[in-house]
Each structure stands twice: as structure tokens, then as C-alpha cells.
Amino acid sequence: MIDVLIIGGGIAGIETACSLQDLGYETIIVEKEKTIGGHLNDWDTLFPTHRSASEVLAHYTDETRRRALTIYLNTNVISVKKQDDGSFEVHTSRDVVFRSKTVVLASGYRLFNAEKKEEYGYGIYDNVITSADLEKKLKQLNGEFKTPTDKVPEKIAFIHCVGSRDEKSGNHYCSKLCCVTAVKQAIHMKQLCPNANVFCCYMDLRMYGPGFEEMYREAQEKYHVQFIRGRLSEVGENANGTLQLKVEDTLAARPCKIQVDLLVLMVGMEADKSTELFQQSCGLQCAPNRFVKPKDHHIGSNLTNIDGFFTAGACIGPMSVFDTVNHAKAVAFSVRDYLNATK
Ligand SMILES: Cc1cc2nc3c(=O)[nH]c(=O)nc-3n(C[C@H](O)[C@H](O)[C@H](O)COP(=O)(O)OP(=O)(O)OC[C@H]3O[C@@H](n4cnc5c(N)ncnc54)[C@H](O)[C@@H]3O)c2cc1C
Ligand code: SF4
């Protein structure tokens, strides 16, 4: 029987395996995709330093090789069953069943489906894209930046809180990272298209982390990104493919219309579907926002309601890379304490 089975090979899962190996434990990572790295595979640069996401990924890829970590790719964990002896039986999509003393869930998050906000025109108008689409576009950029309808944009708007803090979407919580992601992407767009007018339409600005507020200031002072406190109500398309936004300016208390070439929707982060599966198969408790509920928010955020079943990274809620890596390092000690106590 293995010591620790880690569900998910994103940065949380890999960092967990590295930290546990340093403590002398045998681990395996089970990843449903054909490659490790999770969402970072799609991101271009990372806030707050604008460092390339590929550089962080390369660090983890090198570590998996150097440490000869055991990773099962293309393998989806579909259920986890706790056994009478306290161990876990882990069932996968490939009919392989693992036995493990402990489980660390590192299944991350998924993105809000922007098509649900029909009035914003995603999936209807070509020049409406999401923040995740923009990351992928920037990552693959080869030459001049152009909109999906092949125009160098002169006006670009970023809309905050798409699928977060929104009763209609069923997500009351704040996704925490989309404000700073918008600032990062707005700066990037100004660097690529210096003549473009770039707007961010926000409800509140949440610059909670180290370096975030500084980026926000830089966006205004150095790059002249405009921040409008307002709520988008509707998007329409003009005959030439540009978009017309109806925005309620909540500071000036008046409606305004903005014409743009490109609209970027800052989509929120939602609990990954697999947390639901583990709720059903082993009684894992989730919070009202559907992310895994930590056993103790202050002194046990890696623990769950099930002894021997731990969490690392964004499966407990929106988390930056910095916080994810720290959360994953911490889980190694929780697992060690548990294995020592149950020897
Ligand atoms: C648009 C956007 C831009 C961002 N930009 C930044 C940034 O600039 N800087 C920053 O610090 N953070 C950024 N983030 C946040 C960053 O993406 C997260 O911090 C990071 O991805 C969390 O890593 P994770 O390993 O917890 O989750 P994930 O990256 O979601 O990885 C989870 C892994 O688990 C796998 N998995 C899930 N379920 C199963 C299952 N049942 N069986 C097997 N495998 C499974 C998935 O395939 C995936 O590989 C951004 C987020 C968004 C939405
Ligand atoms: S981080 Fe900003 S954009 Fe994201 S949900 Fe919170 S307030 Fe809205």
C-alpha cells in the first residue's frame, strides 16, 4: 500500500509530492489530462511579477524528472472509498484501483462558463472573449496582437466579476484573483497596443496580495489604464464588428455607452466537478460555495471532515500560485503528523 495518493497534477499536486518526498514518503500523482501543470499550461505571464508561467512549469517538470516522481497521466479519479482499516480505495477511469494510507485532493478549480451570461454576448459575438481565452491568445502570440476579427484594437474593455459575486450565476463569493488578473492583462495589452484605450469596469477592486496594489498604481500612472466603477448591463454588436457596451457608472450614477473593439470577461473560478464525486463516494464535506470545506479555517485548512483525506491548492477556493505552493508545502506536514499518529 502506498503512503499518499495525490489527485491532480497541477502545481498543488506536484509541490505536495515534492514536499512529501523530502519527508521520506512514497507518493503517486494521478492526473486526468495528458500533461501535468493544470491551468498554468494555458497562462502566459504571472502576476505580480509578469514572469512567464512556462518558467514556473519548467521548474516543476524538472523536479518531477529529477525526483523520478510516479505520475499516472490520462487517468481520472472517479471515486474514493474509505476502508474499515482507515485506508482508501481510489477508483479511476482506467479501471485501475489504488490502495493508499492517505489521499491529498489537489484537483484545483474550473472556470465559470461565460455563455451563461447571455447578455454579455460570449459565444455570440466574435470579439467577446474571456480572461482565460486572452491568456491563451497571448501565450500563442506570434507577431502583432489582433482581435478575433483581425483588427489591431483601439479600444479594449475588461469586465470584472463575471460569474462571481453574482446571484444570477449562483456564485455569491468573490473569486479573489480576477481583479489583479485584469490589471495584469490590461498592462500587457497596453504594452502590445500602446495606442489603445484600455478600460476596466469593476464593482470593487480587490488587490489583496503583495505587489498587487503596486501593479494597480502602475496600470494607472504608467500605462494610463482607466478604471470605471460600473456594472455592464448589455452588449450589442455593430455592423462593423465593434461592440457597444451599456454600462451603469455607479460613481457618477448615470448610464453610459462605450464602443470597443475587444471585450474581455473576467471569468470567476468555480469548484472542480470532481469535488462533487468525492462528496458522493466518501462523504467529503463542501462549503456553500461548493469548494471543499476545510476542517478548520485558521489552523487546519489542509484538513477535511475525513481523517486521512487532505487538500492542497485551489480545490478549497480561489488561490494564487504563491498561495497554492505554500498550501501544498503545508499539507506535507499535516500528512506526516497523521501517518505518525496512526502508525
Ligand atoms: C484567467 C486566470 C489567470 C490567472 N493568472 C494567475 C497569475 O498570473 N498568477 C497567479 O499567481 N495565479 C494566477 N491564476 C491562478 C492559478 O491558475 C492557480 O493559482 C493555480 O492554477 C492553482 O493550481 P492547482 O494545482 O491548485 O489547480 P489547477 O491548476 O486547477 O490543477 C488541478 C489539476 O487537477 C487535475 N484534476 C482535477 N480533477 C481530477 C481528477 N478527478 N482526477 C485526476 N486529476 C484531476 C486537473 O486536470 C489539473 O491538472 C490565474 C487564474 C485564472 C482563472
Ligand atoms: S477579484 Fe475582483 S473581479 Fe474577481 S470576483 Fe472579486 S471583485 Fe470581482
Image: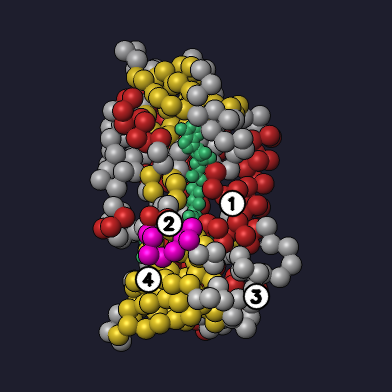
Foreground label between 3 and 1: 3
What's the residue at 58%, 64% (across, down)? Answer: 49
Q: Earlier in the sequence, mark 3 or mark 2?
A: 2
* Crowding near the residue tagged with mark 3, few <14, some 14–19, many ≥20 C-alpha atoms within 10 Å: some
Mark 3: which amino acid? Answer: Val
Sequence-first tag of 2 and 1: 1
Q: Quadrant of residue 336?
A: top left
For marks 3 and 4, give the CA distance.
24 Å
- The label shown at residue 152 is 3
Residue type marked 2: Ala
Report whether the residue tagged 1 is closer than 8 Å to ligand 1: no
Q: In the image, which is nearer the foreground, mark 3 or mark 4?
A: 4
- Is disc 4 in contact with disc 2, using a CB cutoff of under 8 Å? no
Q: Which of disc 4 and disc 1 is earlier in sequence?
A: 1
Q: Is residue 36 left or right of residue 271?
A: right
Distance Cα–Cα, label 1 vs label 4: 29 Å
Q: Residue placed at 43% from the left, 26% from the top?
A: 78
Magenta span: 117-124
The mark that comes first in sequence, 3 or 1, is 1
Q: Earlier in the sequence, mark 3 or mark 4?
A: 3
Q: Are marks 3 and 4 in contact (CB under 8 Å)?
A: no
Q: Which residue is mark 4?
A: 234
Q: Please state which amino acid type lies under the numbered disc 4.
A: Glu
- The answer for how far apart the CA atoms under marks 2 and 1 are is 17 Å
Horizontal side of 196 relative to 97 (left or right) equals right
Instruction: Provide the residue designation for mark 2.
Output: 114
Q: Pointer 3 and pointer 1: residues touching (CB < 8 Å)?
A: no
Residues packed near mark 1 inside 10 Å, few (<14), some (14 to 19) or many (20 plus) = some
Disc 3 secondary structure class: loop
Figure check: 291 above or below 185: above
